[in-house]
Amino acid sequence: MVGSFFCASATNTFMNGEGDAVENSAQQKSDLAALIGKMPKISGYLQTGWNYSTAGNGTSSFQAKRLRLLADGTVTPKLAFRLQIEAFNGIAGSLNGNGQKNLQVMDAFATYTFSPAFKVRAGQYYIPLSYENYDISPATLETVDFSNIVYRMVCRNPYEYNFGDYGRDLGVMIMGDLFASQDGFYHMSYDLSVTNGSLPMKDDPNKSKDIIASVAVRPIKYLNIKASHGWGEYTQSYETMNRTILGAWYNNPKGLLVRSEYGILKGENNSFDENSIYLLAGYHLQTKYGEILPIVRYDNYNDKVFDTTANNYDRILLGCTFQPTANLKIQLNYQHGFYSSKASEALGKDGYDQIQLMGLFKF
């Protein structure tokens, strides 16, 4: 009996010890999972490949076109933040003394969601002008490069015009979705932004502010119609510069893609007077190897003040994007630009050709 009691007691003691160890291990794993869940989500992508162009003196170069690192996190269930850093941006005015591409802070903002209809964003963010600057990123763009509505209209801040501003600025914005249907396809969204109108990562050197407003409506499934307007003042003399962009976008993820935008940029005392339009069309083809998206794009740009520059052209792009997985896409673009008659005479050439072969790798 004593022996039987001793053995039973020893067995119970051993089993209790093992049970405690298992329970402690499970608790540690749970604590670790909770800690990881509170950490920011880290993601990013690299876009690299080859670029050939006959514009100017001509170039043929391997490129690390974009390298972006993003951190998205939540402070509270209603308060979220984003940090985005880019290397290899190469935008004029951002190179170092050796002509090398620098690191830049693209996004650094917090968003508080009172409700889907009312959100407040503060910090440095992408301004709500045009589809391509606000609703599309390089990771989701159908072509290698954006249209010049983005590069020449959106990325030209009114105050410090000689530098690219990446379509970003420091300020405060309210935004939201109204009248949303249960499936989320039919609604109206709005954005109202007040920003410095200066360069990113820089305090405002004057008293003026940029005001940008946009409204987008989804009347039917897959169709979005958008109007956006930006008002700002240019230089220390506070001359106004206005930008208006109108667009429509139909995108069936398993079928037809069509998008078009028309933009106008005007400055006080005829300092700027420009307009641009693009029309992009494609079709999402689903295959066993992944999605194939053939693309054609026509775009036009007119600079009525500086009408002999290379910014006066018609351009046709033919391209194809192959996306075998969600984290990889390969893009081949060919485009030919036709300079206007005045620009052609001043530049001594009728146009140019460009070929781009790029891979985009996400993580």
Image (spheres, grey):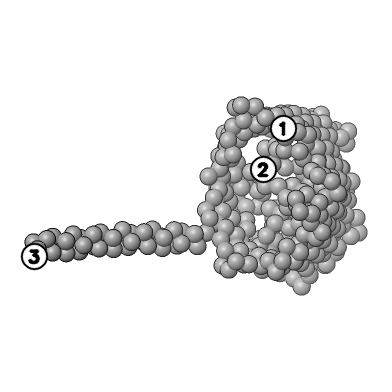
User: Tag 2's secondary structure?
Assistant: loop
69 sits left or right of 168 in the view: left
Q: Amino acid at mark 2?
A: Thr
Mark 2 to mark 3 CA distance (whole Å)? 76 Å
Q: Mark 2, mark 3: which one is toward the viewer?
A: 3
Counting from the top left corner in percent of width and height, residue 307 is at 87, 42
What is the spatial separation of the Cα atoms under label 2 and label 1, in whole angstroms? 13 Å
- Single out the residue that lies furthest toward the front: 1
SS at badge 1 = loop
| Residue sitting at x 78%, y 34% | 256
Mark 3 or 1: in front is 3
Q: Which residue is mark 3?
A: 2
Out of 94 and 88, give the one closest to the viewer.
Answer: 88
Residue at the far right: name it: 269
Mark 2 or mark 3: whose residue is earlier in sequence:
3
Residue with the mark numbered 1: 284
Residue type at the position of mark 3:
Val
Above-or-below relation of 92 to 27: above
On screen, residue 15 versus residue 71, left or right, reads left
Q: In 3D space, how far apart are the residues under numbered discs 3 and 1 (Cα atoms)?
A: 80 Å
Can you tell which mark lies on residue 38? none
297 or 210: nearer the viewer: 297
Residue bearing the label numbered 2: 140
| Amino acid under disc 1 | His
- Residue 263 visible in the snapshot: no
Identified at 65% across, 31% down, the residue is: 291
Query: Nearer the viewer's eye, disc 2 or disc 1?
Result: 1
Q: Which badge, 3 or 1, comes first in the chain's sequence? A: 3
- Quadrant location of the N terminus? bottom left
